Structure formats: structure tokens, C-alpha cells
Amino acid sequence: MFYGLSIGLISLIVFGNIENLILASQGVVKAANPLKLAIFSLIVVLAWLIIGTVCTQQLEAYGIYIEFIGGFAIFVLGIQSMIEAVKG
């Protein structure tokens, strides 16, 4: 039981951080304010930590769907970031 909970928590934190890194790179490409970007990034990471800690056990039955949506979001954001980097 504890092992499954820790794997779910780790996967949520990893997905959250990967999405956060992609969004941060998009902010750099668009020349966003680095201080505002850093503050927002910390808020997003903290939100993912809270979601991962509180909701992992309740959402365990939907893990397959959550992982698919997270992976798809990372894929789409990564493609979008690369297209914008090539354009600019």
C-alpha cells in the first residue's frame, strides 16, 4: 500500500516538474519577466506537491487516464515550445 502511494506521488511530482520546465522555457522564449516567472513556477510546483500528497490515494483508480493526459500535455507543450523557438 505505501509503495503504491509513493510511486503515485513521485509520478505526479515528475509530471508537474516536466510541465513546469516546458512552461518556463516558453516564458524565456517570449522574454517574460524572470522574477514573475520564478515566482509562478514555485507556486505551480507547490500546487503539484499538494495535489500529489492529498489526492493520490483518492485518484488512484484513474491513474492510467491521469498519466495519459499528463504525457499528452507534455508532448503538446513540447511541440509548441519547439515551434515557437524555431520561429523566433
Image (cartoon, rainbow, N blue to C red):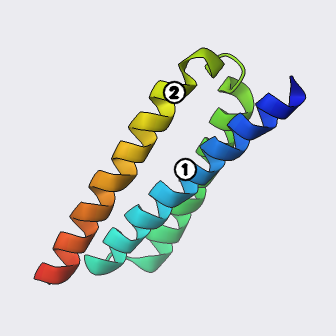
* SS at mark 1 in the image: helix
Residue drawn at x 39%, y 62% as measured from the top left: 23
Q: Is residue 32 left or right of residue 18?
A: left
Q: Is residue 5 left or right of residue 76?
A: right
Disc 2 crowd rating (10 Å Cα; few below 14, some 14-19, many 20+) is few
Any part of residue 31 in sight: no
Residue drawn at x 28%, y 79% as measured from the top left: 29
Query: Where's the N terminus, which quadrant?
Result: top right
Above/below status of 27 relative to 56: below
From the top left corner, tell me how far across and down residue 3 is, in percent.
85, 33
Any part of residue 30 in sight: yes
Q: Which residue is mark 1?
A: 16
* SS at mark 2 in the image: helix
**Foreground: 30 or 16?**
16
| Label disc, if present, on residue 53 of the rendered structure | none
Which image quadrant is residue 27 in? bottom left
Furthest residue in direction right, as rendered: 2
Amino acid on which the number 2 mark rests in the picture: Ile
From the top left corner, tell me how far across and down residue 80 is, in percent.
22, 62
Which image quadrant is residue 54 in? top right
- Report, in whole angstroms, how far the alpha carbon at label 1 lies from the one at label 2: 16 Å
Above/below status of 8 relative to 15: above
Query: Where's the C terminus, which quadrant?
Result: bottom left
Disc 1 crowd rating (10 Å Cα; few below 14, some 14-19, many 20+) is many
Q: Which residue is mark 2?
A: 64
Q: Nearer the viewer, mark 1 or mark 2?
A: 2
Q: Is residue 10 left or right of residue 23?
A: right
- Going from N to C along the chain, the mark reached first, 1 or 2, is 1
Residue drawn at x 56%, y 57% as measured from the top left: 17
